[in-house]
Image (tube, rainbow, N blue to C red):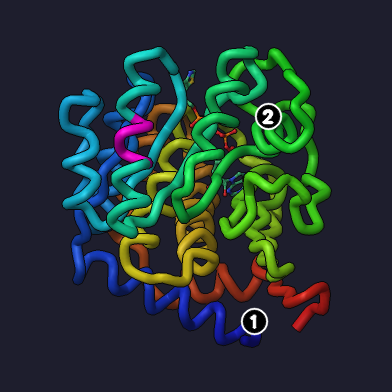
């Protein structure tokens, strides 16, 4: 597939989201749960956020995709996520796993490893720091963001836990890759003025919304990250942190196809098997 074909397919997926309104199950964290639900809803999906192991497997079974956000982990949350991942594997529901703050503590790293070893299909979405920790096993003890981490060197991930899955890494540039060497790079032209809390979580949720629409999870991850980064880049020049966050939701619900297409043409690079197309 060529770069232009990838862009056309991303635009098709994005247009299909508000028409299809897929039900997407998220086990969120308490910090960003409401923002994630709003971002999903503004983009056209129907979020359902359920976090008790008494019901998570059942709710995942009847959803079109499942997003496991591992922020604020606990034994109870671990059990709920495990139920959903096993249900997703049984019922062929696509998964997005977001290992929030994987390098912040030994518990988070062990948790991510143990959930990655379950047999589900889907996308692992993290910032450069989180993916570094999962690939190397090194803790960073730097909280949930990725200060100090540049573009990840991944070609393709040697870690067997990623085998058969899509890896979506955010940061100075975003990188989406599969285990066959296919890769999309999104080169952000400028750094953002505000590190808005919850944007990484919301980007993962949008990957889940698009995964609900297609079996091509590489494309779904590219659609989720590119759509969300487009919205971020367009609201970033507003005055303050709070109004930028609010305008982000407005923008997600009002994006125009021409602007999104031009953005994709300016930031997206597609490589297949190491060759730039
Ligand atoms: N300079 C940028 N311009 C536009 N979007 C960006 C930029 N940097 C990151 N993003 C987007 O912000 C979202 C969150 O990424 P990131 O800040 O790396 O996550 P986290 O909050 O987990 O550290 C992603 O959708 C990513 O594409
Ligand atoms: C769980 C958690 N703890 C502090 S901020 C946060 C939410 C994650 O933020 P982001 O989506 O920006 O990585």
C-alpha gap between disc 1 and disc 2: 29 Å
- Mark on residue 3? 1
Give whichever of 193, 154 is nearer the camera: 154
Find the magenta span and give its range.
Answer: 81-85
Q: Please state the horizontal and vertical placement of residue 147, each as a whole percent of the image.
A: 72, 26
136 relative position to 160: left or right: right
Quadrant in which residue 193 is drawn:
top right
Position of the C terminus by quadrant? bottom right
Residue drawn at (26%, 43%) of the image: 25
Task: Give above or below for 248 relative to 137.
Answer: below
Residue drawn at (77%, 23%) of the image: 138
Could you tell me which secondary element the residue under label 1 belongs to?
helix
Q: Name the residue under label 2.
A: 146
Q: Please state the horizontal and vertical placement of residue 71, each as a whole percent of the image.
A: 46, 23
Could you tell me which secondary element the residue under label 2 belongs to?
loop
Task: Give above or below for 239 relative to 111.
Answer: below
Give whichever of 195, 236 is nearer the camera: 195
Residue drawn at (26%, 40%) of the image: 38
Q: Please state the horizontal and vertical placement of residue 131, each as a whole percent of the image.
A: 68, 38
Task: Give above or below for 230 relative to 241.
Answer: below
Give whichever of 103, 33 is nearer the camera: 103
Q: Please state the horizontal and vertical placement of residue 29, each as a whole percent of the image.
A: 37, 24
Residue drawn at (33%, 37%) of the image: 36
- Tell whether circle 2 marks a residue whose Cβ is less than 8 angstroms from ligand 1: yes
Quadrant in which residue 211 is drawn:
bottom left
For ligand 1, which image quadrant applies? top right
Please say whether residue 131 is one of the residues in the magenta stretch.
no
Quadrant in which residue 82 is drawn:
top left
Mark 1 or mark 2: which comes first in sequence?
1
Main secondary structure type of the part rendered in magenta: helix
């Amino acid at each position: 597939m060529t770069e232009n074909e990838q862009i056309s397919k991303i635009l098709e997926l994005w247009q299909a989201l508000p028409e299809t309104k897929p039900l997407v199950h998220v086990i969120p964290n308490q910090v960003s749960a409401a923002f994630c639900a709003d971002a999903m809803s503004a983009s056209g999906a129907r979020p359902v956020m359920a976090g008790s192991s008494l019901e998570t497997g059942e709710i995942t079974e009847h959803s079109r995709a499942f997003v496991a956000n591992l922020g604020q982990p606990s034994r109870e949350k671990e059990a709920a996520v495990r139920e959903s991942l096993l249900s997703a594997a049984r019922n062929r529901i696509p998964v997005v796993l977001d290992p929030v703050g994987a390098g912040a503590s030994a518990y988070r790293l062990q948790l991510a490893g143990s959930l990655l070893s379950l047999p589900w299909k889907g996308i692992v979405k993290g910032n450069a720091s989180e993916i570094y920790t999962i690939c190397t096993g090194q803790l960073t003890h730097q909280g949930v963001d990725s200060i100090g981490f540049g573009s990840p060197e991944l070609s393709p991930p040697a870690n067997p836990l990623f085998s058969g899955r899509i890896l979506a890494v955010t940061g100075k540039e975003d990188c989406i890759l599969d285990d066959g060497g296919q890769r999309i790079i999104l080169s952000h032209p400028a750094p953002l003025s505000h590190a808005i809390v919850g944007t990484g979580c919301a980007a993962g949720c949008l990957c889940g919304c698009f995964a609900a629409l297609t079996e091509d999870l590489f494309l779904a991850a590219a659609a989720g990250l590119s759509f969300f980064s487009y919205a971020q880049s367009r609201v970033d020049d507003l005055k303050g942190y709070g109004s930028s966050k609010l305008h982000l939701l407005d923008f997600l619900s009002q994006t125009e196809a021409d602007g999104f297409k031009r953005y994709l043409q300016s930031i997206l690079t597609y490589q297949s098997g190491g060759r730039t197309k």
